Amino acid sequence: MRDKDQGATMAWKTLDDMDLAGKRVLARVDINVPLEGGVVTDATRIERISPTVQDILSKGGKPILLAHFGRPKGVRVPDLSLQQLVPALEAAFGAHVVFAADCIGPGAVAAADALKEGQVLLLENTRFHAEEEQNDPEFAKKLAEVGDVFCNDAFSAAHRAHASTTGVAELLPSCAGRLMQAELSALEAALGEPERPVVAVVGGAKVSTKLELLGNLVEKVDQLVIGGGMANTFLAALGKPVGSSLCEHEMADTAREILGKAEAAGCEIILPEDIVVAREFKANAENETLRADACPEDAMILDAGPETVSRIKVALKSAKTLIWNGPLGAFEIEPFDAATVAAAKYAAKRTIEGKLTSVAGGGDTVSALNRAGAAEDFSYVSTAGGAFLEWMEGKTLPGVAALGG
Ligand code: 3PG
Ligand code: MG
């Protein structure tokens, strides 16, 4: 469970606390970006580590990027070589990027030593070594030989206790990078010591994958909006028909337990009051809007209706803080993105007006917000998927804890 350390984000050393002049700065970054035909299709994670790279350079340090890519499981998979990312990194940093074909060993050490002022070194995928995910101490030692200082800027990989996220942090003087700092302070503002009232929006397909998250949130937030496929499980648990909707009927007891826990904690649960149903799961399928207790047997619920959106807007209007994970409907097909888009746009508007601190992250959330054109207007959009969820569950992330030393 989260302990006080998780909130004490400012206790960690940052790049400002380190003397970097002439030092090899081993920077753990998350550049696990989507690639299509060798081309980066979303460079967000690369752009977001740029401040750390620039700061290391301006302090006279040598940035040495340490990262995983995909899940090669200890095997050298050419398609998962980080070398493919060199052009995208050079474009983002405006600096020459040298590539080392292994993240450990004499080649990596020599490349780090030979690095010239203003250059960046990229080390090959750490997961080409099985010892990385095993957090093998010998492997961590070899990683530590490539740097003098360790800087962890990979919040989105901090839920993994791997050699490059935790092992090496114990061996070198360590600090948090700029993106790590930004992620931690945004999350602290949203769930650590937030301005109240706090509204959480949680959507997505399944209750079963977000149980711990819902259980933690009902104790932390004032109102919890439940949307997407998982809302159907709650509707069914309350005795409402859900037709052929995505629904985990076997989770009914668990859903009722969460509702009971919320009531005890004084957290108001906002479920769909009206629903948009269709007979087919496809774009522009014929659909109708009905009361939440009126789903026909042969129909499936694909979105929340306009009354639900109005209810969410009322909650957002009085809220000071919003934390958002997951879409409210089948946002990837029109028109079933309507509730997600309308709620996201309203949250963006309140944020622009200075009335709301809005933080979003995890899996599909960023693409849902991008679809609404709202992502840029949120106070903070996390680069993290799984790590964001684990943080919302109240867990201490090993990569963050390792910086606490
Ligand atoms: C991510 O893409 O969420 C992170 O890079 C972590 O990747 P992983 O789930 O393969 O550990
Ligand atoms: Mg992942």
Image: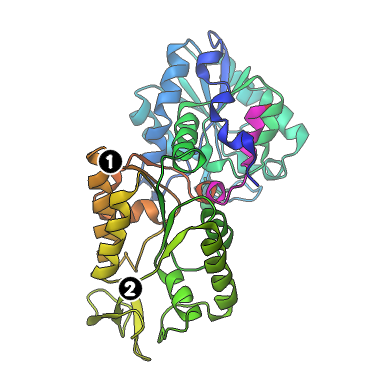
Provide the residue span drawn in magenta: 390-404
Q: Residue at x 33, y 30 (%)?
A: 91
Number of the label disc, if any, that sits on residue 54: none
Question: Residue 400 lies in magenta, yes or no?
Answer: yes
Mark 1 Cβ and ligand 1 under 8 Å apart: no
Q: Height in image: 42 above or below 264? A: above
Amino acid on which disc 2 is placed: Glu
Q: Main secondary structure of the magenta part?
A: helix
Q: Relative to residue 246, is residue 368 depicted above or below? A: above
Across and down, in percent, residue 279 comes to 31, 85
Q: Which mark is residue 355?
A: 1
Residue, disc 2 = 273
User: What's under tag 1, amino acid-wise?
Assistant: Lys
Pointer 2: residues within 10 angstroms few (<14), some, or many (20+)? Answer: some
Residue 384 image point, x, y percent: 47, 45
Does residue 16 show up?
Answer: yes
**Callout 1 crowding tier (Cα within 10 Å): few <14, some 14–19, many ≥20:** some
Asked if the stretch drawn in magenta spans residue 268, the answer is: no
Q: Quadrant where the C terminus lies?
A: top right
Residue occupying image coordinates x 52% and y 51%: 389
- From mark 1 to mark 2, how far is it between C-alphas? 26 Å
Position of 356 compared to 235: left or right? left
Q: Is residue 104 visible?
A: no
Residue 317, given in percent of the width and then of the height, sits at 28, 51
Instruction: Say above or below: 86 vs 389.
Output: above
* Relative side of 340 to 166, left or right: left
| Figure label count | 2
Question: Residue, x 51% and y 39% (percent of image)?
Answer: 192
**SS type, badge 1:** loop
